[in-house]
């Protein structure tokens, strides 16, 4: 088996575990209006994968700069 295919399987498992962690935290509940902060938090949680069960709790804030006057 090639190292690339093993790496691909590991990445796929990592991301699946991240989706499970995001689901456990209720990030996929239909809350209506999802902003960039909520979407960013879900994405970072999925990418963090199994680290979520080790206490990693990523949160994203989206501070949009105000236009100058």
Image: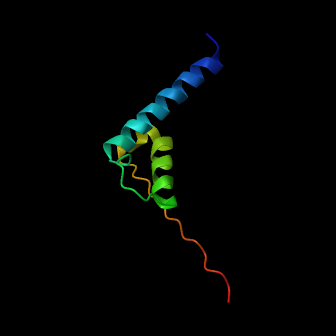
Which residue occupies 53% across, 65% down?
62
The colour scheme applied to this rendered structure is rainbow
> Residue farthest to the top?
1
Which residue occupies 52% across, 25% down?
10
Q: Position of residue 22 (x, y in %)?
A: 39, 44
Q: Position of residue 6 (x, y in %)?
A: 57, 19
Picture quarter with the N terminus: top right
Picture quarter with the C terminus: bottom right
Which residue occupies 38% across, 49% down?
27
Instruction: Left or right? Give the position of 50 relative to 67.
Output: left
Q: Nearer the viewer, residue 39 or 5?
A: 39
Q: Which quadrant holds residue 34?
A: bottom left
Q: Position of residue 49 (x, y in %)?
A: 45, 39
Which residue occupies 43% across, 38% down?
18
Q: Position of residue 12 (x, y in %)?
A: 52, 28
Instruction: Left or right? Give the position of 21 relative to 60.
Output: left
Q: Nearer the viewer, residue 6 or 22?
A: 22
Q: Vertically, is 56 above or below 62?
A: above
> Residue farthest to the front?
32
> Residue farthest to the bottom?
69
Q: Vertically, is 4 above or below 24?
A: above
Q: Vertically, is 60 above or below 23?
A: below
Number of numbered markers: 0
Q: Vertically, is 28 above or below 9?
A: below
């Amino acid at each position: 088996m090639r190292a690339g295919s093993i790496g691909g399987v590991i990445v796929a498992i990592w991301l699946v575990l991240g989706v499970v962690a995001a689901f456990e935290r209720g990030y996929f509940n239909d809350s209506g209006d999802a902003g960039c902060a909520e979407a960013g938090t879900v994405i970072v949680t999925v990418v963090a994968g199994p680290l979520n069960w080790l206490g990693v709790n990523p949160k994203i804030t989206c501070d949009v700069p105000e236009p100058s006057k």
